[in-house]
Image (cartoon, helix red, strand yellow):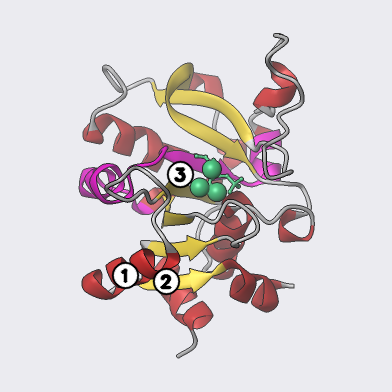
Amino acid sequence: AEPVERAIDAMAAGGPVLVHDAADREGETDLIYPADAVTPDALARLRNDAGGLVCVALSDPVARAFDLPFAREAIDHPAADGGKLSYGDRSSFSLTVNHRDTYTGITDDDRATTITALGRAAAAPDEIDFADEFRAPGHVHLLRGAADGVADRRGHTELALALADTADRPPAVVVCEMLDDAGGALSPAGAQAYAERHGLVYVEGRDLLDAFR
Ligand code: 5RP
Ligand code: ZN
Ligand code: ZN
Ligand code: CA
């Protein structure tokens, strides 16, 4: 099957999927899971094999339901200068959170608890009082998807949410950059080799955009 089709199947099955955005954007490959499928073992893979920042992207309607702002708008400090990133996009960062049932918030168990709860919350936002379940700040970075999705912004945030939507998973996805041993972004070739070694799907952002637009 085509990479896009295999990526959708892999998301439907709980992931992970590797998504490279574009050489003229970040030029990064993120390891992506549906939030509700994340286990402590998945967290260990994100830390050890991806190595970037573990974030959970929520769709715009879910972020709205929970009153989750963009950090670039919410932070009242001169350093919050509009969230413009060096490659021209606006930042999708929102709050950081921990589930209230966690201890430090950073262990694999704790982050998996926070992340699966975010997946459940995103599946039924009307049934949840966000502040009852989560506290901010915490150890999981929330990202907020653009209102018009990939039509408006083509980050891993929107690509991963579009993939989850097509795969019929709740609008909450974990994304984490893959870094190499020298500390730089893992190259597309390196990411493809990792995917092959582990029987995972690697897909190009432009192929997802072609399929979803
Ligand atoms: C947060 C990031 C990542 O690049 C993540 O992929 C989300 O950002 P974007 O939607 O801009 O790709 O910087 O760790
Ligand atoms: Zn990034
Ligand atoms: Zn990204
Ligand atoms: Ca990235």
Marked residue nearer the N-terminal end (3 or 2): 3
Rendering coords of residue 1 (x, y %): 45, 90
Q: Which residue is mark 1?
A: 195
Q: Are marks 1 and 2 in contact (CB under 8 Å)?
A: yes
Rendering coords of residue 68 (x, y %): 65, 28
Residue at image x 58%, y 69%? Answer: 166
Disc 2 secondary structure class = strand
Q: Which residue is at the far front?
A: 182
Q: Which residue is mark 2?
A: 202
Q: Of circles 3 and 2, which is in front?
A: 2
Asked if residue 100 is positioned above or below residue 23 in the image, the reply reads above
Q: Label for residue 135?
A: none
Rendering coords of residue 73 (x, y %): 75, 22
Marked residue nearer the N-terminal end (1 or 3): 3
Q: Nearer the viewer, residue 22 or 41?
A: 22
Q: Amino acid at mark 2?
A: Tyr
Please tell me how crowded label 1 is: few (under 14), some (14-19), or many (20+) other residues with Cα within 10 Å. Answer: some
Main SS category, magenta section: helix
Disc 1 secondary structure class = helix
Q: Which residue is mark 3?
A: 120
Q: Amino acid at mark 1?
A: Ala
Q: Which residues are magenta?
A: 37-64
Mark-to-mark CA distance, 3 and 2: 26 Å
Q: Amino acid at mark 3?
A: Arg
Residue at image x 28%, y 17%? Answer: 104
Asked if residue 111 is positioned above or below residue 158 in the image, the reply reads above
Q: Of circles 1 and 3, which is in front?
A: 1
Residue at image x 54%, y 32%? Answer: 128
